[in-house]
Structures are given as structure tokens and as C-alpha cells.
Image: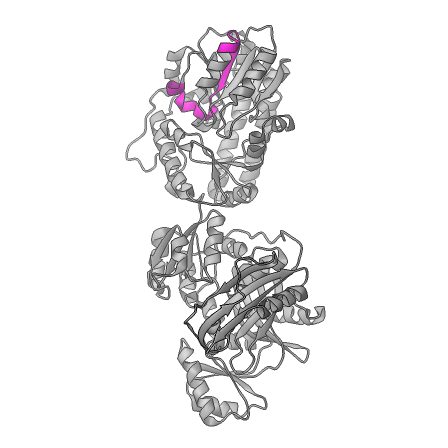
Amino acid sequence: MREFGSEFPSIVLSDGYFDSLKRLGHCTFLRSGREALAFAAKNCISEISVVLLPAYCCWSMSAPFERMGWQVIFYRLMPDLSADLDYLENLLRKYHPGAVLTMNYFGIAPTDSTVALVKSICPTCYVIEDFSHCTFSLLTIYNPNVDFYVSSIRKSIGVCDGAVVESSQQTDLRFVQEADVDFAILRQQAQWNKEKYRYTQGSDQKQAFRQHLSDAEEHLNQFHTIHAISPTAMQMLATISRSQIAFARQTNLEHLLACLEGLQHIVLLPHMSRALSGVPFSLPVLTRRRDEMQYQLAQYGLYAAVLWPISQEAQNVCPVSARMSEEMLSLPIDQRFDYDDIEDCMHKLLILGAGILQIPVIKKAKELGIYTLVADGDPHAAGLTLADCSVVANITDKEVMLEIARSENIDGVIHPCSEVAMESMGYINQELHLHGINVATVRRATNKALMRQAFAAYGAPSPQSYCTETWDNAWRIFKTFSVDGILKPSRNSGSRGITKVTKKTTQEEFANAYSRAYQQSRDNSVLIEEFIDGPEFSIEGLVCNNRIHILTITDKLTTGAPHFVELGHSQPSLFSSADQNIIHQAVVSGIRALGLDNCAVHAEVKLSQGRAYIMEIGARLGGDFITTDLVPLSTGIDMVAASIHIALGISPDLTPKHAQQGSCIRYIVPDSGVLIRVNGLSETYPDWVEQCVFYRCVGDFIPEVSSSLDRSGHIIVTGSTAQEAISRAEQLLESFDFVTK
């Protein structure tokens, strides 16, 4: 992180802002904001020791009054953080307070109407305004009817201590003692240690910072007197340039507002653009995932503050305060940051592919507040319009993808639910040192021949397999098998080009099957493997920092021989715990064999005679809506969000958000022919139907199912158990009638 000003060619000089405040009246510099409030309160000569405070304020704002014996009463705020004038009026007429505290929150909640109301009803009532969020805007927001302006300077700029009280009347300085040098020293030592650990990431320096800061704050929390600002802090103030700070904060805020536009999980406070006319304090946002967002930003060295925990009394008075207390996060925009730092508030994710299987990933990334850059070779790909930025380009061209990734300064890359551009993803990770698998690992996870070699070397269980480049070589090998065989492309997915061959298969039939596999292979080679007879499963998992997390085992329904196209999946597995344990162990050994780390895992396994055989393991999210829909429905774990976070180098949240239940997908496969009529499809379904999608239109030709591309639609349903979900899915399928000829 650069210090602000490093991009300027010359030294930035002070413009004397704090000295200029003296033109407004009597200006007093003190140690802290709470002592400044105490000073203002002591100068309020009133027989009525009742003070009205906005319901959204820190305990340190009420503490000075309470310690002096004042009765604190909270008034309600509107959603834009302006005062609820009707509510305030009732309190003014009821209590006739000695003082009212106002606050121009974040520079977006002007207080002129509030001040006017107070003075019209209670002319002798003192108005104290906290302008900590508008420290550099006082010259423009100044209202002569405000009796005391108070600001905690150290919240706005990096001084070791400091606050300012601006008053239109003469103040009694007898309340002020000499500067507390010890407090200033502790704060300054904390700042030094913070700088050390920011750049070194040293745990000792971080602990030292925390200890000095804690000591300083404890020193302050025990205040019973009011102290002048330290000489050190005053020297710091003399070097401040308001104009440069204003420029930095305004441009940073404007940039961040543009970055956050359209995010579903973030709500901006009303009238946020008002802050641009002054010197913004920060960018407050409302999000129900505040803790998660704060944690993610902290991993990038950006601390977003929570302002503030609110007393239950204040929350009871004001629903707006209650929501702010639960959801508000203050994003940093101050002069220490530049555009690169501000953009860290939005992680940049490059998503390779924008087809139907990638759309849930694009939507999830945007929901998480992540800037999405999506690339696809098809200019009509549906997901392109959903992204923050889209690029039409060949995603298999790794050099082109690398240049895009580098120019956009991405934080991570993901290629979900497909293997087409896996090598591009690995290449980007490798060249930009991102959190994900490299090219060598990608090749082991996408080339079935290399995969089988890795399994054999590690001792991971898999079928006997041979890589061939001519049909006659494959035929000779097959003739040595004592069981049936499988022909498949060495590189492809989605059941493309797969054919079972038996002992009754003729040489001509074998050659034709080999040709289909060869045409679908991306590296001009074909595997001939022993056929494993038994039920098939997929296993969904994640690997993060070398820790393997198996999330669920999926039971699979296929067409069977000869092509084994997948017609459905259900979770959790209905097989015994013993069988599932065998599968689990096999997959773990396969992951270790391939050297997978920091990626999603989609494995295909068969179970035969009490032994698991790994068909393949993909270093990616699985397709067929398994990871995007079934996993979160059945486990309560958002696997898509977790895989996105892993790609960005963020520790994933694998905590189940609801109890385990059953989920099931079934594909719609009408008889082959021209589609004449469709009966049974509806606009409304029972609550347990999550999706019902038909891909074809009347007049379309329905092909024979020889790959996953030939399926015509799908349904996704839930149930209290997997068996119930399966039964519901089968029942729904039976209600459809597709007429072809």
C-alpha cells in the first residue's frame, strides 16, 4: 500500500486548514473526542442536565455526559441518518433539554433543519455538533446557531492524538490540563509498530502494536480530566494539506461507488453522493454478511471499521440504529489509499466461460461483492451480459487470457464446470502467482492418460488403461482383456465420445467407436480401458492449503451402455457408510496422486465387488448442476462461493447453513424425432421443485442421447431424504408428455 502523495512529483505542503478554523471563533485543541465533548458539556451553562443524543452513536459520545450526571435521552433517526424531526420535537417539548447533540453522518446528513427546530422550541438549549465525519468540511457546513462543533481529529487523519472544539462563544479553559505526554507516546508507538507489521507481516510487531494501542485506549477510557492536545500531534497538524486530502477522498469515494454499483448484497445509504461536495470520511455500506466482508478485506490489509455497537436502549428507540448496528461497515477511502487499494474492496475474478453452467458462478461472484470479468469465445453466451466486464475471446488461447488477466490486475481465475480452458487457467495462475493449480497439475487432471499414470505411480485404485493413437493398436490391446472395455477420448468431458465395447463387438464396430472417441479427443489419442461393472458415483470436494474436504457423495443415474450419458444425480448417497468410506479413501488417494491443491474437486468413481475404482478426477467444479445446486441444497454448504474464495486466496466458509436434506436432478430425454407437442409443463410447481427447465421448442429435432449435449431439459427437486427427492423427481417426470414423430 502506498502512502498518499507518492504519485505526486513534488512535496505537498500544508495549506493551514486547522489554523483557519480560528476565523470561525474560539478554537481549542484537546486530546480526544470524548474529552472534547466533556469540554463542550462543561461550557454549557444550564440548569437542566438533560441531553438529547442521536440513537446511532458510540458509547464514548454518551459517556462524557453520563459521567457529569447528565440524563441521556436518544432521539430517532430517518433512513438517511437525518433526525426524525417529529420525534425530536416531542422530546424537546417534553424535556426542554439543556443540550442537544447533532451529527452530520458521513457528510450526507445535513443538520440545519435539526438545529433550527431545537432553537425554535428551546432557544436557550445548547447545540453541540459532532463533525468528526466532516472534519475538513467545517468551513462549508458551518452554522452560527451551533454553539459547539466537536471533532475527533485522530479518526480522520493519522495523528497520535487530537480533537478540536470550535465555539462561537468564549470557552472556559480552566477545565483543560496540560497535554498527557504518556498517552501521545503510547499512541505514537502503536502507529510505528503498525507500520512495521503492515510491511513485514511480523507477528511480534503486530502484537506490539496491539499492546501499545490497548494500553493507550485503556489510558483514555479512564479519563476524569480534560487534556490539551500533545505537542507532537500539533506538529503533525501543521503539515496537513486539506486540499490534497479532499482530492484523494473524493476521487476514491467516487471510484468505489462506481465499483459497488449494482451489487445485490450491499446497500448504500441514501444521498451518498452528497459526501462528494465535501471531504468524505469513509463509505458506509449495509450488508448482512458484514463479518465475512470485513474478514475478507482484512486479508488484503484493509481494515473496514464497524461504527458502532449500539446500546439496546438506542436500538429500541430507533429501528434504523438497530439495522446500522447489525449491518453497517465503514469502507476506507482516506488519503493513505490509492485506486489499487480501493479496488481491493472489490476482489477481481476472471471467469473463463459464460455458458449456462457458468452463469451460477457469475451470479454468485457478484452476490459476494466480487468484480467479475468474464471471457467467452461466443459473443452470444448468456453469461456475458451478467458480468461487470465481458470479453469475447478464445479462452483456450492461454497467451491472450494471460494478457487480459494481467492488464485487468485480477486477484484470481476460475474455469467452472468445464475443462475446455483449464490449461489457460493454470497458465494464468502460474505466471501471475495466483492461488490455484499450475499447468503441470492441470494436465494431470485433464489428460486421462497422464491421470492414469499418476494414479498408478501413487497406488490409487483405477481401471487398467492404455493410451493409443490408432484403432488397430487399441484393438490388439482390447483382445487381451478378460472383461469388456471402454473407449474414451484421453481429453474431454461430458461423456463425449465414450463407448462400451464387448467381446461380441466386431472389428468394424470397434473401429467406428474408436473413430468417435478420436474425433472428440483434444490431443488425438484414445484410451482403451477395462470396463468396471458396478454403480457409479461423483464426489464433490475442495482442497485448500493442502487440506482435503470431501463434501458429499452423489449417486448417479446413466443411460448405461454403450455411451453412459448421465441422466440424473441425487444426494446424499443411499449406499452404506462402509461403501462410502471406501469411496472416500479412494478419492483422497487420487487427489494426492494428482497433487491437487487450492481448487475444487469433482471425482467419478465406480464401486465393484467391495472395491472403488477412480474413473477420473477433475480439478474443477462439477457440471450437471451438481455443485451449483445439489450440494448447497443437500449439505447447506455453498460450494460455489467456497471455490470462488479459494481462487482468490480467501479461506472458504464450509459451515452448513441448514440441516442436511435430499436433493435430486433428473434430465428430460424425450423420444427421438421432431417435437410436435408438449403437455404437462407448468408455470407453477410445488415448493419442493427448485427448477424445471426445458431446452427445446416445438419444431426442434430431438436427437438420440449419445452425450450430455443431447439432453432436452432438467428438473431439480428436494426432499427430507434423498429417496423422497428421487421419488418426487420421478413423479414429476411422469407428468410430462413430449410428443415426437
Tell me residue 409's x, y (percent).
38, 51
Q: Is residue 29 above or below residue 630?
A: above
Q: Is residue 324 above or below residue 389?
A: above
Magenta run includes residue 89: no
Q: Which residues are magenta?
A: 120-141
Residue 226 seen from this side: no
Magenta run includes residue 136: yes
Q: Is residue 700 above or below residue 160?
A: below
The answer to whether 419 appears left or right of 730 in the picture is left
Residue at 43 percent across and 59 percent down: it is 429
Tell me residue 311's x, y (percent).
63, 28
441 or 713, which lies in front?
713
Residue 289 seen from this side: yes
Looking at the rendered image, the quarter that the N terminus falls into is top left
The answer to whether 425 appears left or right of 225 in the picture is left
Q: What count of labels does the image hold?
A: 0
Residue 684 falls in which quadrant of the image? Answer: bottom right
392 or 459, which lies in front?
392
The colour scheme is one colour
Residue 520 falls in which quadrant of the image? Answer: bottom left
Residue at 47 percent across and 89 percent down: it is 510
Residue 421 falls in which quadrant of the image? Answer: bottom left
Tell me residue 83's x, y (percent).
51, 23
158 or 200, which lies in front?
158
Tell me residue 418's x, y (percent).
46, 66
521 or 216, which lies in front?
521
Residue at 41 percent across and 61 percent down: it is 353
